[in-house]
Amino acid sequence: MSSLLHPLDAIDASVLLPDVRYAGRCPATGRERALGPTPAVIGAAAALKRYLASRHDASTGFSTRELYAPFTGKMFGVMLCRDSGGALGILRAFSGGWAGQQQPPGWVGPSAHAGEYAAERARTEALLAQLTQQIDVLKAAGGNGPAIADCKAERRRLSRALTARIHKAYRFENFLGEILPLTEVDTGSPRPPTGMGDCCAPKLLQHAVRHRLEPLGMVEFWWGQSPRTLPRVEGAYYGSCTHKCYPILGFLLRGCDAAAVGP
């Protein structure tokens, strides 16, 4: 069994399933594909909620205390999977990163092939910091307009180059072996939205694809303080977002037998 597959608890078949789903329109067929929760998934979500609550005051390791600062809660997700040997287990994910880490122990990693741009990011961020410091020095010295403008232009160029490198490292893969670069996702705008692929559902699906696991169901819920712009209730279940997830989930669910296919 995969090292990130958590054991499955006893299943309560009578549990009520929330009316949520994780859906997108398939770019090849134009039909909508969706994966939703099962009783086992809701049981796993309840277990994860208990774990998160127990880690609020943890002094070492994984702690949820930071989620209770103003507007800093997160979406969490669980997926029921079956490995190649037929064993069932649960994958866990959270949206974005955590305390400077992309993958703390026991959680699935980011959708991007982060290793491809890690060194470039470190080098570029050091150069950006140097340019910012140089601009501050020039301003403090009375300002050399052309020199400041040149530094700002170089800073913009480096930022754009790094962004392009990061986008290139985001290549979505599905269960049919197909690959969809982030830059080719149809979002209706010239550039993909920031954070596309970093929500729970795509992270869980990408891990399943890359580790030959068969998804059987999943669900997401909110934990921690609510954001101001999009109010959330701690512990409540939510479906996938239309802005960042819908444009890619239809592709990611191609070849997933458990995904429902709509009109």
Image (cartoon, rainbow, N blue to C red):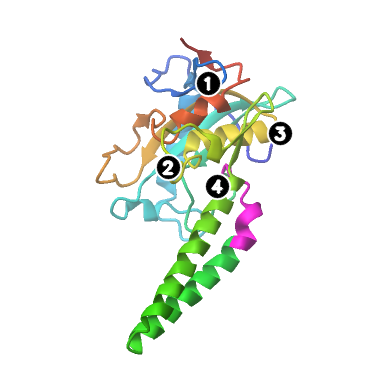
Q: State the residue position of label 2.
A: 193
Magenta-highlighted residues: 108-120
Mark found first going from the N terminus, 3 or 2 = 3
Observer-side mark, 1 or 3, equals 1
Which amino acid type is marked by label 2? Pro
3 or 2: mark nearer the eye: 2
- Horizontal placement of 94 versus 90: left or right? left
- Where residue 38 sits in the image (x, y, percent)? 49, 19
N-term-proximal mark, 4 vs 2? 4
- Who's the residue at 42% across and 30% down the image? 240
Distance from the alpha carbon under mark 2 to that under mark 1? 19 Å
- First-in-chain label (4 vs 1): 1
Nearer to the camera, 79 or 164:
164
Is 112 within the magenta? yes
Residue 152 seen by the camera: yes
Comes first in the chain, label 3 or label 4:
3
| Quadrant of the image occupied by residue 109 | top right
Element carrying mark 4? helix
Q: Dot 3: within a 10 Å radius of its alpha carbon, few (fewer than 14), some, or many (20 or more) residues?
A: some
Which numbered marker is on residue 167?
A: 4
Could you tell me which residue is drawn at 49 percent across and 70 percent down? 128
Q: Is residue 213 left or right of residue 45?
A: right
> Which amino acid, by three-letter code, is at mark 4?
His
Q: Which residue is mark 1?
A: 26
- Asked if labels 4 and 3 touch by Cβ distance under 8 angstroms, the answer is no
Measured Cα–Cα span from mark 1 to mark 3: 30 Å
